[in-house]
Image (tube, rainbow, N blue to C red):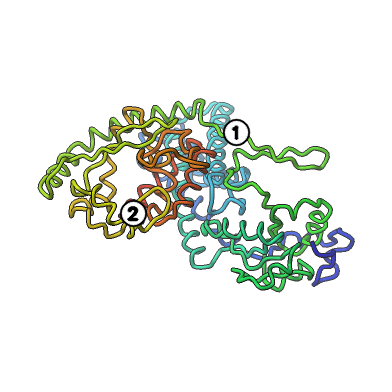
Amino acid sequence: MAGARVGGDPQLVTNGATRRTWRRLVRASNWHRYYQGALVGVDLLAALLATVIAVNFTHAPSAGFDTENQQHFFYLTVWLVLPLAWLLALWGTGSYDRRYFGMGNEEFKRVIRASMFMLALVSFAALTFKADVSRVAVAVILLAAAVLVCGFRYAARYGLHKMRLAGKGVQRVLLIGAYPEALEVYRTVRRAPAAGLVPVGIYVTEGASSVRNLDTPVPVFAGTDVVTCAERLEADTLAVCGSASADAADLRRLAWQLEGTGRDLVVAPALTDIAGPRVHIRPVEGLPLLHVEEPKISGIGWLIKNVLDISSSVFGLILLSPLFLAVAIAIKADSPGPVFFRQNRVGRDGETFSCWKFRTMYIDAEERQAALMMHNETDGLLFKMKDDPRITKVGKWLRRTSIDEFPQLVNVVRGEMSLVGPRPLPAENGDFLGDVRRRLLVRPGITGLWQVSGRSDLSWDDAVRLDLYYVDNWSLTTDLQILFRTVAVVLRRKGAY
């Protein structure tokens, strides 16, 4: 890394010590302050709406507050004290931490912690003052507030994603390290625009001469002061990539340089596609050791997943039976052949099974595929065409709406598939080589990360990467997120053909 000189105010840094402590609170980018203010507003609105619901839609919400003074105290509590207590609880659990805005589950986990704290606080207050409060009203106001806070924050996150797609509310990142490592981090963060990380330059720490004639996606710098370079690019975040962080002294000096500049320092280790819950930091004598745990595809969470799979699929088959009948009639009226199409697919541990779908092609589709191979629009083990002549008129509608996948609920009930998981691949492709085999550790799913991230618009490599990420970082929360995202993807009909 570059030397220890910092441009700008000479009073900010002297031998690694920041003199003006207050300047540490000044950030180079202030978009998060406006977003935090918006979150405070929506959280307060959610708490007040919860009070409206509890006061107006529960029987005798002020039971136990009989006198006029007690009634005043009740309304003061539910309209003022509880909403302010909610804000304090959310602040105390770190729900306004800017690091968790826009991505991941941590923001909502902290909201749930705040909800648990509010439940404990109200219970403790009622027990301490021996208040004979309406238990129904208490349950409604706390539950409604928790649900509304999560719902409003989800809407706020959606708005933030829209802003970031428009180039607002983002962090301008200067990548530091060897060019191949920095380029890998560049590609990774560009795949997730919702994270709000926009690389604006690469500071090469070694091999600068080999990059000189390359066509780079962002400007490349070398041989100058790294903080001065960040100032020139108006970068508010410096990301140290891979082996560039190996020299602890350089990394420590860079952290000293950034004190008082309002710029963030992050370290991107050479661990890709590993989610946070599997990574833990254990400091040993000042050395931060990263512990990477094995994937957890067992335990109580896995049992709950199996129970939800079977129960939801049985309920879905019963609920959708009228739709199945209508689709069956439409398929038979559109073209000759069976209603369902069954194809051998590879499931968990390499076992093959018959995957059920509504038939969307003419009965001679497989024989005609060889003549269409030159028009294949994807790579890897799958064949895809946007305007496939083998697809029937009804089949096109079924594919656009994803209704053709619904019969796979039968496979879920039989234990061959799951609601969420990697997509099952055709068995005729033979043995899966390399990393692809790791997909077989779990049951294939009707939907998965591949489907909610682009479906047929993704390359084979991206599809495999997403499936492996799911296998390595599975959690029940991830499954629920994918199910919610699936609804939005189906409604937009993105990548469905």
Find disc 1 in the rendering and name its residue: 294
Judge the density around disc 1: few (<14), some (14-19), many (≥20) Cα neighbours within 10 Å.
Answer: few
Locate residue 39, reporting x and y percent.
53, 54
Locate residue 290, reporting x and y percent.
70, 40
Residue 72 visible in the current orientation: no
- Where is residue 34, by image quadrant? bottom right
- The numbered dot on residue 384 is 2
In this rendering, would 117 be left or right of 289? left
Name the quadrant of the N terminus.
bottom right
Q: Secondary structure at mark 1?
A: loop
The answer to which of 292 and 74 lies nearer the viewer is: 292
Judge the density around disc 2: few (<14), some (14-19), many (≥20) Cα neighbours within 10 Å.
Answer: some
Q: Name the residue located 51 percent from the left edge and 31 percent from the top edge.
A: 297
Residue 160, compared with residue 280, is above or below; it is below
- Amino acid marked by disc 1: Glu
Q: Name the residue located 83 percent from the left edge and 57 percent from the top edge.
A: 253
How far apart are the two marked residues, 2 and 1, measured between alpha carbons? 35 Å
Name the quadrant of the C terminus.
bottom left
In this rendering, would 411 be left or right of 263? left
In this rendering, would 290 be left or right of 448? right
- Amino acid marked by disc 2: Lys
Residue 251 visible in the current orientation: yes
